[in-house]
Image (spheres, rainbow, N blue to C red):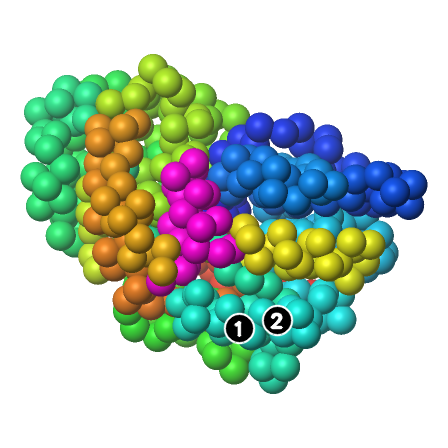
């Protein structure tokens, strides 16, 4: 999903953070031992859009109860806890979500997960985009630790009312034509800034940086911080430097609201209409609606992203071996990642399916989003999903990404100049990769 991260990736969850931070083992064992219902715990971050699917599955499977635990969009809380549970051999859910940028780390210890190939998953290969399927496989192709959920897609979500206040077009096609390149996006931002609407042009430099990086890497090298041989290339991959320099141009132009992505301040800025645009993979639509609230319905719309395509986000569902209900958990994971499950999740919270069958379904192709001024989200996001170019994520991708984005953030806040920020980014990235 996406990718809700640092996928920082998603909205404030509807379940309490304290539930995820509990170190108790997954529920249901006592009930099952007594002949009662089996409780399956699903660990997620952000909003996967599964609530209605859970209830449907329970109705079709008497004796199964599903409980979801989550931490909003904060992978910095979720992933270390999941790693801890896996190492301890207890505490993880029966089904766990793994963000694409962290998948390589978990695949390094495949013994922690059920090999889904041993449970009929090979027959499901055609239900996923080829690269999405391959992403769940270990390097030798002998174990499948995860079934794909969503892919990112890319767009720009914008506030029509703020654009109108700045004298800019508000029609989505006209807005898309304003910024064929990121340089044009900066130019439009400068025009917006000059009108003194009281809002910033964009939310946070880090979100924009990550969008540009993944777009550029997908269209050039095919990797970002690590090459496909798992060599750290943060200071030699031109895609990283290009994204950094473009983001610095945005910062230097004074266009960012400087809201720390996924922070409480960031969430409040949605409600208070404090910025006009945000980098918007498909899953971000659910984040925006959740954060901006019902009063902003019809004030948001969706335009094309500057540049060409791009993919940010996407997750997998895995079954830890520590689960005491592996058979039931495997079937639930299959259901949630089926074409039907992916369509249902998209309709609830917007994560774009990784299933070709779902992407071709009229429910996706012809879908609109009333919150975003009836934007044709199916055409905007799904049309190019099959041709998305994935970006390879290396073994310490998340740790390295955190350091690079921290450096971008210091430049954004005026604590470091761009040259110092780049030095910090590369130096600290190397340290993170060496740990």
Q: Is residue 75 above or below residue 102?
A: above
Would you identify the image quadrant in which residue 29 lies? top right
Residue 399 position within the rendered picture, expressed as x and y whole percent measured from the top left: 59, 58
Neighbour class for label 2 at 10 Å: few (<14), some, many (≥20)? few
Residue plotted at (22% across, 36% down): 375
* Mark pair 1, 2: CA separation: 6 Å
Q: Which residue is mark 2?
A: 120
Q: Residue at x 61, y 71 (%)?
A: 120
Task: Inspect this view and state whether residue 429 appears.
Answer: no
Q: Residue furthest top?
A: 295
Q: Height in image: 129 above or below 59?
A: below
Question: Which numbered marker is on residue 324?
Answer: none
**Picture layout, residue 265 above or below residue 219:** above
| Mark 1 crowd level (few <14, some 14–19, many ≥20, 10 Å Cα) | few
The residue positioned 58% from the left and 28% from the top of the image is 14
Measured as percent of width and height from the top left, residue 298 is found at 24, 23
Q: Helix or strand or loop: what does disc 2 sit on?
A: loop
Point out the image quarter for the C terminus.
bottom right
Question: For residue 151, what is the image quadrant?
Answer: bottom left
Q: Position of residue 147 (x, y in %)?
A: 55, 62
Magenta highlight: main SS: helix
Secondary structure at numbered mark 1: helix
Which residue position holds label 1?
123
Let me know if residue 354 is in the magenta part: yes
- Residue 160 belongs to the span the image colors magenta: no
Give the left or right position of residue 329, taking residue 223 as reference. Answer: right
Residues 310 and 321: in front is 321
Whether the residues at callouts 1 and 2 have beta carbons within 8 Å, the answer is yes
* Magenta-highlighted residues: 337-356
The front one of 379 and 300 is 379
Image x and y of residue 417, in percent: 40, 48
């Amino acid at each position: 999903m996406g990718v809700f991260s640092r996928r920082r990736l998603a909205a404030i969850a509807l379940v309490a953070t304290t539930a995820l931070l509990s170190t108790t083992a997954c529920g249901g064992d006592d009930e099952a031992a007594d002949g009662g219902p089996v409780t399956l715990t699903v660990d997620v971050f952000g909003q996967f859009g599964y609530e209605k699917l859970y209830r449907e599955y329970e109705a079709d499977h008497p004796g199964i109860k599903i409980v979801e635990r989550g931490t909003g969009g904060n992978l910095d809380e979720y992933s270390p806890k999941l790693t801890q549970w896996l190492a301890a051999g207890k505490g993880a859910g029966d089904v766990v979500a793994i963000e694409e940028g962290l998948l390589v780390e978990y695949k390094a210890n495949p013994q922690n997960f059920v090999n889904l190939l041993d449970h009929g998953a090979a027959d499901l290969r055609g239900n996923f985009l080829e690269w999405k399927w391959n992403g769940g496989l270990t390097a030798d192709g002998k174990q499948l630790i995860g079934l794909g959920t969503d892919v990112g897609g890319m767009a720009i979500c914008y506030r029509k009312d703020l654009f109108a206040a700045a004298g800019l077009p508000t029609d989505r096609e006209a807005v898309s034509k304003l910024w064929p390149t990121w340089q044009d996006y900066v130019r439009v931002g400068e025009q917006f800034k000059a009108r003194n609407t009281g809002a910033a042009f964009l939310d946070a430099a880090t979100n924009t940086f990550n969008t540009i990086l993944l777009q550029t890497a997908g269209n050039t090298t095919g990797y970002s911080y690590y090459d496909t041989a798992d060599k750290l290339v943060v200071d030699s991959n031109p895609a990283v430097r290009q994204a950094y320099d473009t983001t610095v141009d945005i910062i230097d132009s004074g266009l960012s609201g400087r809201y720390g992505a996924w922070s409480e301040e960031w969430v409040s800025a949605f409600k208070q209409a404090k910025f006009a645009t945000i980098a918007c993979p498909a899953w971000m639509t659910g984040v925006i609606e959740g954060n901006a609230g019902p009063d902003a319905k019809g004030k948001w719309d969706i335009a094309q992203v500057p540049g060409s395509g791009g993919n940010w986000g996407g997750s997998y569902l895995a079954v830890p071996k520590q689960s005491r209900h592996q058979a039931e958990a495997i079937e639930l994971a299959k259901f949630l990642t089926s074409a039907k499950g992916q369509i249902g999740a998209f309709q609830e919270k917007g994560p774009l399916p990784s299933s070709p069958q779902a992407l071709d379904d009229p429910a996706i192709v012809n879908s609109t989003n009333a919150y975003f001024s009836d934007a044709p989200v199916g055409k905007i996001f799904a049309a190019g999903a099959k041709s998305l170019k994935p970006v390879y994520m290396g073994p310490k991708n998340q740790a390295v990404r955190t350091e690079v984005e921290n450096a971008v953030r210091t430049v954004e806040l005026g604590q470091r100049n761009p040259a110092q920020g780049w030095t910090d980014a590369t130096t600290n990235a190397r340290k993170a990769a060496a740990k």
